[in-house]
Image: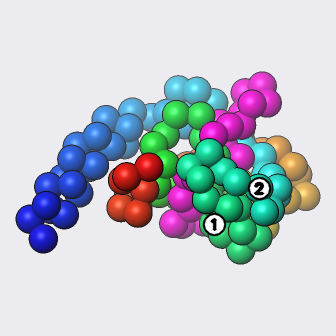
Amino acid sequence: MALLIIWVALALAFLLPVMRASEASAYGNLATWYAPWGATTSSGNVLDANDWTAAHKTLPFGTKIKVCYKYGCARGVVITDRGPYGPGRVLDLNLPVANRIGLTSDGVGAVEWYVTGYDPYYMSK
């Protein structure tokens, strides 16, 4: 139990600078969506059609974010992949997340997003 508390404390200490830095505004805030279901992500997980996941170029795997767009917010989205590689884009969202916030029909849009936590499952990845 003590080891778990130490790991969580270290993870939070690592993420606090990320949470304080306004990365969304510093690097742009364009997001797009993708759906290569069945593909293996950079974290080693297989992308599932129902997962609330996203890709980001530098955030640690397991980082949880909240993403908001025209029709609401998606909470608990987990970074499991690397990307996007399109110009000016910061996030690639899995289709269920894009559907929830209304990004699917637009394809690409300016979103607001925030780091909200960390999924300890990814600590060893």
Amino acid type, residue under disc 2 in the picture: Ala
91 in relation to 73, above or below? above
Image location of residue 21, percent across then percent down:
39, 33
Identify residue for label 1.
52
Query: Three-letter amino acid code at disc 1?
Result: Trp
Q: Is residue 90 above or below residue 67?
A: above
Residue at point 66% right, 51% down?
41
- The answer to whether mark 2 and mark 1 are in CB contact below 8 A is no
Q: Judge whether residue 122 can be spotted in this image.
A: yes
Q: Which residue is pictured at 70% across the width and 61% down the height?
A: 47
Q: Which quadrant: the N terminus? A: bottom left
Q: Residues within 10 Å of mark 2 (few under 14, many from 20)?
A: few
Name the spot of residue 64 as percent of width and height, x first.
47, 57
Label 2 belongs to which residue?
Answer: 39
x, y percentage for residue 25? 55, 32
Q: Is residue 87 above or below residue 58?
A: above
Taking the magenta stretch, the answer to whether it contains residue 89 is yes
Q: Main secondary structure of the magenta part?
A: strand
First in sequence: mark 2 vs mark 1? 2
Q: Nearer the viewer, residue 44 or 35?
A: 44
Provide the secondary structure element on which disc 2 rests: loop
Q: Nearer the viewer, residue 99 or 78?
A: 78
Magenta range is: 73-92
Query: In percent of the image, x 70 and y 54: which residue is there?
Result: 40
Q: In this image, 90 relative to 75: left or right?
A: right
Q: Nearer the viewer, residue 34 or 19?
A: 34
